[in-house]
Amino acid sequence: MDSMVAKNYFYIVRNLFNKYILIPIVLIGSLASCASKGPYQIDLMPPPEVYDTESLNPFAKDPVKPQAGILYATNRAPASGEDEELIYANRRGYLVRLGRAEIDFGDQQIDWEEARRISLLKNRGAGYPLKVKNVEEYGVLDRSYHMFMQPEDRADDPKAAAKRFTTEINEKLAISKKKDIFIYVHGYKVIFEDPILVAAELWHFLGYEGVFIAYAWPSTPKLTAYFSDAETTNVSSRQLRVFLEYLAKETNAERIHILGYSQGTRLVTETIYNLALTNSCTTTDTAHNKTKIGRVTLVGSDVDVGLFGTFIMDGFLDVPTHTSIYVSGADKALGMSNTLLGKQRLGEAWQSETSEQGRKALTQIEEKLSFINVTETEGAKEGNGHGYFRKSPWASSDILMGFLHDLSPKERGLEKKEGNLAWTFPEDYIERLRKRLEQLYPQTTSMSTMHNK
């Protein structure tokens, strides 16, 4: 009898492995083998639906052009001669390195006016590729120095990199109507160039307002790295915290907003949690003034719901001015994570399963925390349903307008039925959002001139 139970157990485990581990690895390996070699690139995301090419668009008459580059911070190790990567390796570096990357937007033979016109087209036809053209590292952030680092990593002038980075941020803020910093934190299984390019396109559709920074933590471009990358987010939280503290203290930014995606939300939430503990003896206003953390937006969040609940108990929501969690019932990637780990993920549409007491508690803090359900929005189910913040023109409209104009879900045109935790997108969402923007800024024809009153 015992041998029969053991045999049945073996077959169950083997079937689960074949279904959830082996088959996906084979499929993705097959896709990778068919991929063309060459510089890493992505196609520019569809324009947010709120924009049109005439009245509401994100560009001023003469905006900062993409050739100015995107700032980055990374705790990846620099690539060596033994690495396949050219710039930064897919392994931990334990130091925060600062720099700037130049981006090639589309066909460089066309002028800037034509390039921005094409970027706003709903149906572009052929892809509009983005590639990293050049990367210049400024050096190591001195605040990230530690006792275990290699002696050769210590610069002759330890503060030089931070000074240069600060100067560039402040120069950009000085010519921007939005005096804020935006930070994008990517998911797992991507190389260094990916967050650089995604940050560049997001900044493009913010009309180059404020300063956008890509934070590239050392994820590994392998499906099998899921669990090791999860541990790397924990290791990286110190570096991200040090970087945020540096930005708050040494730049002229009024607020620092963070967009975390997928497994990168583990890094973001752990970091904000650490800031909450660090500032637990201060008032909420003092914490806001000290950390300058503004809106924290979590998309496709691969965080344990129960873990996030413990973060809330210890003051997580006292650090940002507001936390937005985008959820989807069509996110197959999070469904796989749920299966592997056996726990609800924060980015799943789990609110319907919340207990009455939990629902009551979350409703009482809705001025600090909002849930937005994107399940039925256009583009949200494309692919595996996980990358909707780039693929859904409604979702991107909501995220970017929340960042740019600091609007609440209701002000953005979302609606919430009585008894529900999550806000949803009504059929006339885009009309509502455009009307709200026109009410706030009736004399404006270019959205990049709109800013908080």
Image (cartoon, rainbow, N blue to C red):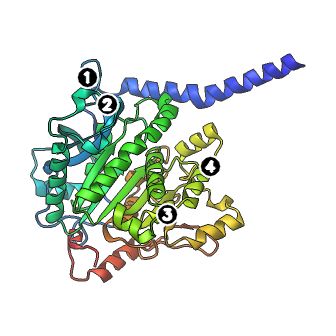
Q: How many C-alpha atoms fall within 10 Å of the one at disc 4: few (<14), some, or many (≥20)? A: some
For badge 1, the amino acid type reads: Ser
Choose between 109 and 152: the one closer to the eye. 152
Q: SS of the residue at dot 4? A: loop
Whether residue 382 is situated above or below residue 432 in the rendered picture: above
The amino acid at mark 3 is Leu
Amino acid type of the residue tagged 2 in the rendering: Met
Residue 250 is situated, as x and y percent measured from the top left of the image, at 23, 57
Q: Nearer the viewer, residue 368 or 101?
A: 368
Q: Nearer the viewer, mark 2 or mark 4?
A: 2
Q: Are marks 4 and 1 in contact (CB under 8 Å)?
A: no
Residue 170 - label: none
Of pointers 3 and 4, the one earlier in the residue sequence: 3
Q: Is residue 352 above or below residue 364?
A: above
Which residue is located at x 62 percent, y 49 percent? 344
**Circle 1 residue:** 80
- Which residue does the numbered mark 3 point to in the structure image? 317
Which of pointers 1 and 3 lies earlier in the amino acid sequence?
1
Among the two numbered marks 2 and 1 on one chain, the one whose residue lies closer to the N terminus: 1
Identify the residue under disc 4. Answer: 344
